[in-house]
Amino acid sequence: MTEVFFYILEDEAADAPAHFACRLTEKAHNEGHRVFIHVADAAQASALDELLWQFRQGSFVPHATAEALEADDDLTPVVIGTGEPPTGFDDMLINVGGEVGGFFSRFARHNEVVGPQAMATARRQYRFFKDRGYQLTTHKIAAR
């Protein structure tokens, strides 16, 4: 069964969820995970694509947007997208915005990155997972 983690950010900065998602993605990539980062729209995907290249000096997280991914690419370890994940991505899901459809359950680990502005949505999602018997873990993350 999918493990569900909520990362509740205390940082009020509008870009805090994206920065935290980059850190979480880097850690997951370094541990050998394939990561799908779910975002709300194409603009957020583009911004996160740029941020992953520069969020921390010395960091390297090979990635692509789902739109730019080749159909037969099974080497790219991190993909950013707005909809259904590409085939082969069922290890780790990081949701940075938007509604995650039923595809979350195909992942071993689902991560919700929640900024202060999205608490109402996070509460609704938490109830959704809890009511269905998923194991939930919550981490409060202090401001950077």
Image (cartoon, rainbow, N blue to C red):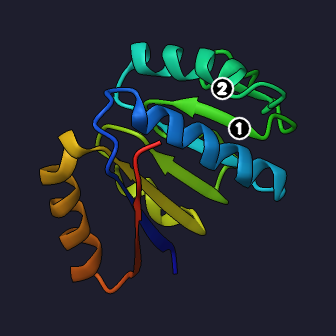
Residue 14 image-quadrant placement? top left
In the rendered image, the vertical position of residue 140 relative to residue 21, given as above or below: below
The x and y percentages for residue 124 are 15, 61
The x and y percentages for residue 92 are 62, 57
Residue at the spot x=26%, y=80% of the render? 130
The three-letter code of the residue at mark 2 reads Leu
The x and y percentages for residue 7 are 41, 59
The x and y percentages for residue 55 are 64, 25
Q: Is residue 1 left or right of residue 86?
A: left
Q: Is residue 130 left or right of residue 61?
A: left
Viewer can see residue 55: yes
Residue at the spot x=34%, y=42% of the render? 11
* Residue occupied by mark 1: 78
Viewer can see residue 67: no
In the rendered image, the vertical position of residue 113 relative to residue 21, given as above or below: below
Residue at the spot x=47%, y=42% of the render? 144
Residue 108 image-quadrant placement? bottom right
* Residue occupied by mark 2: 52
